[in-house]
Amino acid sequence: MDNDGFSAGTLGGRIRDRRKAYGYTQQELADAIGVSRKFVVELESGKETASLGLTLRALKILGFDAPGSASVGTPGEKFAKEFEETLAAEDYEFALRLIGEYASASLRTRRALMFTAPCIKDQEYLTALGAITQWVSNKTGIPAPSWTRNIRPSAVPVFLSEKLYPVGDLMKELIRKDTPLEMKNLNVWIRERDLVTA
């Protein structure tokens, strides 16, 4: 039954499009929901007897605000734009604060907010944002957006605060001890407590 253009089929199409935008496979989405891949195939094809509870879980994982009608993707787009503008202006003090705000907002919504990479030239910040996005994804149990899979470890250790002032060896060792594994793996060094501002 079609109601003003909204049906199980259109919802399934929206779910499929969002899954692809995030770069998730059907199996990755199924694993995040806790179901078989068959459920995701049926959901995306518009099967009307799909479980409502599991469908709502899929919608939440993919960032829909209400059942298929609106998306919560705009906060991620706003963060990406703020990072782009802030780093283009080389305002590293605000960029550091923005890192914490992004991590905190992502944790509050229980998923990484940036499902596409921001367009920034600063490779250290891009690597750091990829690492933070992976960290959020691991903390929330939601697959990391596909763009983070393309992030490679930095050739030199990334201490973002060094863009503002020199960081001594003793402080670097303290930061290294408190840095989450996802960031260590990419040679990005940020204390976990500096990522949570709220």
Image: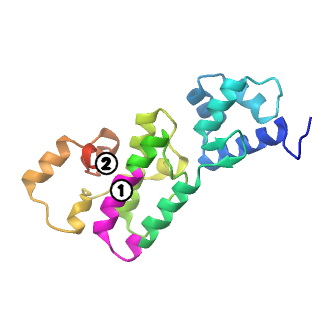
Q: Which residue is mark 1?
A: 99
Residue 122 falls left or right of residue 39: left
Q: Residues within 10 Å of mark 1 (few under 14, many from 20)?
A: many
Alpha carbons under labels 1 and 2: distance apart: 7 Å
Q: In this view of the protein, which residue sits in the foreground, 142 or 70?
A: 70
Residue at image coords 83%, 27%: 48
Going by the numbered disc 2, the residue's amino acid type is Leu
> Is residue 147 visible in the rendered structure shown here?
yes
Query: In this picture, is 52 found above or below 126?
Result: above
Q: Which residue is mark 2?
A: 195
Residue 109 falls left or right of residue 132: right
Query: In this picture, is 1 found above or below 34?
Result: below
Outermost bottom residue: 89
Q: Secondary structure at mark 1?
A: helix
Going by the numbered disc 1, the residue's amino acid type is Ile
Query: In this picture, is 28 found above or below 169?
Result: above
Q: Secondary structure at mark 2?
A: loop
Residue at image coords 60%, 43%: 63
Residue at image coords 37%, 77%: 89
Residue at image coords 43%, 65%: 83
**Residue 88 belongs to magenta span:** yes
Residue range in magenta is 86-102
Magenta stretch, overall SS: helix
**Disc 1, disc 2: CB below 8 Å?**
yes
Residue 162 falls left or right of residue 141: left
